[in-house]
Amino acid sequence: MFGKRVLIIDREDWPVAEVVAGYRSQSDAEFSFSQLKDRHVVSYAPMHHWTDHTIRVHLFARVPGLQLAHLMRREARRGGLRLSVRELLSQLAGIEESVLIYPSAGGRPTVRCMLTATAP
């Protein structure tokens, strides 16, 4: 009624600040699992499996993928980029590589790899 929350914990050795930080970080974990449903991040759909075992394996493969996406976001933040996981993956998906092969007169052809123009 007054916007108060009562947190009941079994960790008597935790300081109050740590309890509050743990409670607030719960929403981060819930958001991460909601990203498993997002087709533009690490979606688990469409899933073409019918048995419990193959469904578990399918989801098990998605969780490390989501973890890797969040690690990439963290490294981007350390580099000064403030992007969400979705924005980061979108930018990375736009990078393409072209391989140009120039024939030579008598030896091996010259190969040159070029990336598409990327954002700074």
Image (cartoon, rainbow, N blue to C red):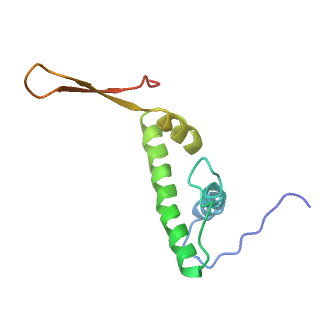
Q: Position of residue 16 (x, y in %)?
A: 62, 64
Q: Residue at x 37, y 31 (%)?
A: 97
Based on the displayed image, in which of its 4 quarters is residue 90 positioned?
Answer: top right
Q: Residue at x 52, y 41 (%)?
A: 89
Say whether residue 17 is left or right of residue 68: right
Give the position of the N terminus as an image quadrant. bottom right
Q: Nearer the viewer, residue 105 or 97?
A: 105
Based on the displayed image, in which of its 4 quarters is residue 53 positioned?
Answer: bottom right
How many numbered circles are shown? 0
Q: Residue at x 65, y 75 (%)?
A: 9
Check the image and report above or below for 41 versus 56.
Answer: above
Q: Position of residue 41 (x, y in %)?
A: 58, 49
Q: Nearer the viewer, residue 8 or 28?
A: 28
Based on the displayed image, in which of its 4 quarters is residue 84 positioned?
Answer: top right
Residue at the extreme right: 1
Say whether residue 99 is left or right of residue 76: left
Q: Position of residue 29 (x, y in %)?
A: 61, 60
